[in-house]
Amino acid sequence: MTRPAFTFVAVFVLAPTLAVVLIGALLLFGAEPRLVFLPGHFVKAGLESFGVHAPNRVGVLSTVVFWWAIVLSVWLGLRRLPRTRAQ
């Protein structure tokens, strides 16, 4: 049984919040910032190769979107797992 309201809240509220918390936790526990923000650096460098000067917030936002996509794909993958009923 699908619940559209739950899915909407999970995709647009919980997943982005978890992505931001995940980025903060990675930085807090010692991951190098250049590795955490690497997806954003790639996007920013790609835009600058086309001659568009992209501010730093573009890199940060694209990093959050990248981690959001990872969180969302894990969540969707877990939803597809078969559920066993406790007896």
Image: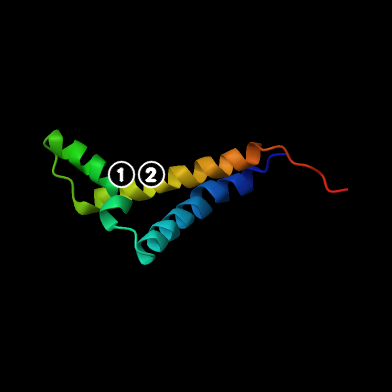
Q: Position of residue 3 (x, y in %)?
A: 67, 43
Q: Residue at x 35, y 62 (%)?
A: 27
Q: Position of residue 11 (x, y in %)?
A: 52, 46
Q: Position of residue 8 (x, y in %)?
A: 56, 46
Which label belongs to residue 39? 1
Is 53 displayed left or right of 84 in the figure?
A: left
Element type at mark 1? helix
Q: Are marks 1 and 2 in contact (CB under 8 Å)?
A: yes
Disc 2 crowd, CA 10 A, few/some/many (<14, 14-19, 20+):
some
Q: Quadrant of residue 39?
A: top left
Is 73 displayed left or right of 30 in the figure?
A: right
Q: Which residue is at the far left?
A: 51
Q: Residue at x 83, y 48 (%)?
A: 86
Q: Position of residue 4 (x, y in %)?
A: 63, 42
**Closer-to-camera residue (51/33):** 33
Q: Which residue is at the far bottom?
A: 28
Which label belongs to residue 23? none
Q: Amino acid at mark 1?
A: Pro
Residue with the mark numbered 2: 66
Element type at mark 2? helix
Q: Earlier in the sequence, mark 1 or mark 2?
A: 1
Q: Residue at x 74, y 41 (%)?
A: 83
Is 71 displayed left or right of 81 in the figure?
A: left
Location of the N terminus by quadrant is top right
Above or below for 57 versus 66: below
Q: Which residue is at the far right?
A: 87
Above or below for 62 versus 26: above
Q: Quadrant of residue 80?
A: top right
**Closer-to-camera residue (4/61):** 61
Q: Amino acid at mark 2?
A: Phe
Q: CA distance from mark 1 to mark 2?
A: 7 Å
Above or below for 19 versus 83: below
